[in-house]
Every structure is written in structure tokens, then in C-alpha cells.
Image (tube, grey):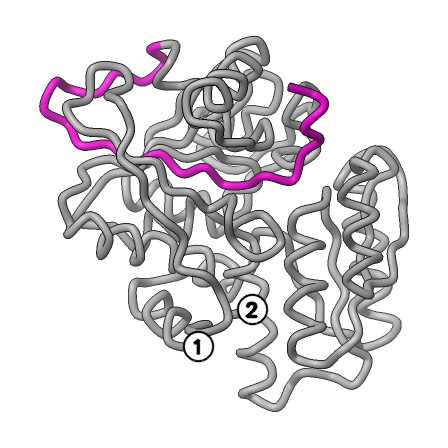
């Protein structure tokens, strides 16, 4: 559904619109001979989602299909922030549907970006249904949080950037999985050059269950990372890419996620949300154990969090 050519096109399209986020050398985690942290929490709006949002909106503008009604999306928070930011930069209105459980800090930021915010239900799936209906009723461009080709290809620009920054020396990319847009894009971008390990909370195993079942299936949503990894089902694009590229799935506990988040702050003074800490938790706990000579890059995917919760 997405190929490396789609990601290269996305990289050209979003150039100058998104930040080239830093890569920082870190102490070896889980026995890896070399470890990098990809600091995507420094991206516009505090997460990787800006990449996909810009690619979706700009692709529509290029093709003449960006409507006067603007854009609409459903989000636990981060995707909405990204779409609101991209829409404001391009000069169209954005309407964002979020669950009532979305953190207040994210809702406040959405409104500060000029988005119209509608809170619906307690789960992402309910916000999604309402947003899809709104798009159909108004003709606004629907921006899926994780399961559209342009969204996934935009997220994949992170993978191309990471390969450039490590001179192609990375063997494995470890990242968190919710709906799978980041995983799909990065796995497609690094296919043939590196492998991807997808890490999920035990309480929201969308990728894990999909690989077991042979297709995306519904899972329960709960736990400390539910605000940003709270998709109840893996995306179809993510599943296809995961199977095609051999993405490996591992699970970590909420306790391990909380500990990894605290460790990132205490060791490196990096403030991230629980979703970003999920990837680190896999290496800290041994859920994923690199080979002694393996070169590992860990994606810190977002920082939209309350510092007081550390």
C-alpha cells in the first residue's frame, strides 16, 4: 500500500515544513553495541505526527482536492495537534474530534492552534466515527490518524532521515505502535536496510494480536499510554507493511513504561510522553534483546505530557 517511492515523494513535499529532528548517541541498552535516540519529541507540535499531517494536506493542495471546508480529524491528541498545525500553516480551518479522556494539555493546545475541538465519547473509536460523519456531511478533507497512504508515507520520512543521520549504519529501529502509522512508514522506508521492532503496552496489543490472528482485530484500550497509543485496531496499511517487512512485535507492562519515562528524564533530562517511553521500556526490560554487535535506534515519538506526572 505504500512503497519507498511514496516516502521519498513525501520527503520532498514536506521539506521545509517539518523539523529534521536530532539523533543522540545513548548508552547501550539491552546489550546493543551502539544505541541512538531519535528525538522526534522535538518535532513541531511535539510528535512525529506533523510529518504525516503535512503530507496529507499538502498532497491534497497539490492535486486541487483541498476543500474550502478545510480538514477534519479524530485523535487522542497528537494527530489532532499535527493536523491543526498543518492546516493553520496552509491556511485552512481544522476541526478535531477527541475523546473526553484526552489530556487537558492537548485540548488546550489544539484550541491555541485555532482548531475547533469537539470532545466525543471515552475512546478514540467514538471520536473517529463522529469525525468521519462530519467529513461526509461537510466535504472537509478527512485526515486519518494512522491509516491513510499519505499519512503513513509522511511518517516514513522519519525513517529516511534516520538512515541519513546514522550513515545507514543502523540495524534495528525500535518504536512504539498504536494504530501503526509510524511503524508502517518507517518499516517501508528502511526496508532492505534495517528491521523494525514494534513495542506496545500489554494493555493495548494491536500489532501483537493482528500478527497472531493474521489480520487486524479489535483489542481493549487501557493503561498509561492510552491517550496516544489508544487505537483499538491496527491499521490495514500497517498490517500489510508489518507482514511484508517482517516487523517484530514485543509487549511491555505499564510499570516498565513508567520506569523508562522516569529513567529518560533522570539520565538524559528528556521529557517524553508514555508512548515514547514504551519503546525504551522494551530494551530496559529485555522484552527485546539486541545482539552484542547490533546497532539500534530508538524513536522517542512524542512529548505532549504533563511534567508534573513524572
Q: Are marks 2 and 1 in contact (CB under 8 Å)?
A: yes
At 74% from the left edge and 84% from the top edge, which residue is drawn? 67
Of residues 288 and 296, the one drawn nearer to the viewer in this rendering = 296
The magenta segment is 286-310
In the picture, residue 286 is in which quadrant? Answer: top left
Horizontal placement of 213 versus 5: left or right?
right
Indicate the position of residue 73 as horizontal and vertical percent values.
74, 59
Q: Earlier in the sequence, mark 2 or mark 1?
A: 1
SS for callout 2 = helix
User: Which quarter of the figure is the C terminus placed in?
Assistant: top right
Label ID, residue 13: 1
SS for callout 1 = helix
Majority secondary structure of the magenta segment?
loop
In the picture, residue 222 is in which quadrant? Answer: top right
Indicate the position of residue 200 as horizontal and vertical percent values.
50, 25
The residue at which mark 2 appears reads as 54
**Residue sitting at the far bottom:** 64
Instruction: Assess whether residue 139 is covered by the magenta stretch.
Output: no
Instruction: Give the alpha-carbon distance from disc 2 to disc 1, as whole Å.
Output: 8 Å
At 47% from the left edge and 33% from the top edge, which residue is drawn? 176
- Asked if 60 appears above or below 97 in the picture, the reply is below
At 53% from the left edge and 78% from the top edge, which residue is drawn? 59
- Asked if 21 appears above or below 194 in the picture, the reply is below
Amino acid at each position: 500500500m505504500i512503497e519507498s517511492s511514496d516516502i521519498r515523494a513525501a520527503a520532498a513535499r514536506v521539506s521545509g515544513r517539518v523539523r529534521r529532528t536530532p539523533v543522540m548517541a545513548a548508552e547501550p541498552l539491552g546489550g546493543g553495541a551502539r544505541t541512538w535516540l531519535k528525538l522526534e519529541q522535538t518535532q513541531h507540535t511535539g510528535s512525529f505526527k506533523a510529518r504525516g499531517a503535512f503530507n496529507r494536506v499538502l498532497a491534497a493542495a497539490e492535486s486541487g482536492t483541498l476543500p474550502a471546508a478545510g480538514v477534519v480529524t479524530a485523535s487522542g491528541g497528537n494527530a489532532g495537534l499535527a493536523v491543526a498545525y498543518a492546516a493553520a500553516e496552509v491556511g485552512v480551518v481544522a476541526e478535531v474530534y477527541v475523546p473526553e479522556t484526552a489530556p487537558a494539555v492537548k485540548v488546550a493546545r489544539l484550541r491555541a492552534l485555532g482548531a475547533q475541538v469537539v470532545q466525543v465519547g471515552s475512546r478514540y473509536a467514538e471520536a473517529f466515527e463522529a469525525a468521519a460523519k462530519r467529513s461526509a456531511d461537510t466535504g472537509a478533507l478527512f485526515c486519518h490518524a494512522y491509516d491513510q497512504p499519505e499519512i503513513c508515507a509522511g511518517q516514513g520520512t522519519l525513517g529516511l532521515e534516520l538512515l541519513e543521520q546514522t550513515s545507514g549504519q543502523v540495524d534495528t529501529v525500535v518504536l512504539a505502535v498504536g494504530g501503526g502509522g509510524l511503524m508502517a512508514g518507517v518499516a517501508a522506508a528502511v526496508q532492505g536496510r534495517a528491521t523494525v521492532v514494534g513495542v506496545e503496552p500489554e494493555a493495548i496489543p494491536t500489532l501483537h494480536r493482528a500478527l497472531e490472528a493474521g489480520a487486524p482485530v479489535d483489542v481493549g484500550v487501557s493503561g498509561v499510554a492510552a491517550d496516544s497509543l489508544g487505537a483499538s485496531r491496527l491499521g490495514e496499511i500497517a498490517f500489510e507493511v508489518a507482514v511484508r517487512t517482517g516487523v517484530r512485535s514485543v509487549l511491555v507492562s505499564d510499570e516498565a513504561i513508567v520506569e523508562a519515562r522516569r529513567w529518560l528524564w533522570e539520565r538524559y533530562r528528556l521529557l517524553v510522553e508514555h508512548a515514547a517511553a514504551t519503546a525504551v521500556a522494551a530494551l530496559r526490560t529485555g522484552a527485546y534483546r539486541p545482539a552484542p554487535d547490533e546497532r539500534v535506534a530508538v524513536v522517542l515519538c512524542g512529548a505532549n505530557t504533563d511534567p508534573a506526572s513524572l
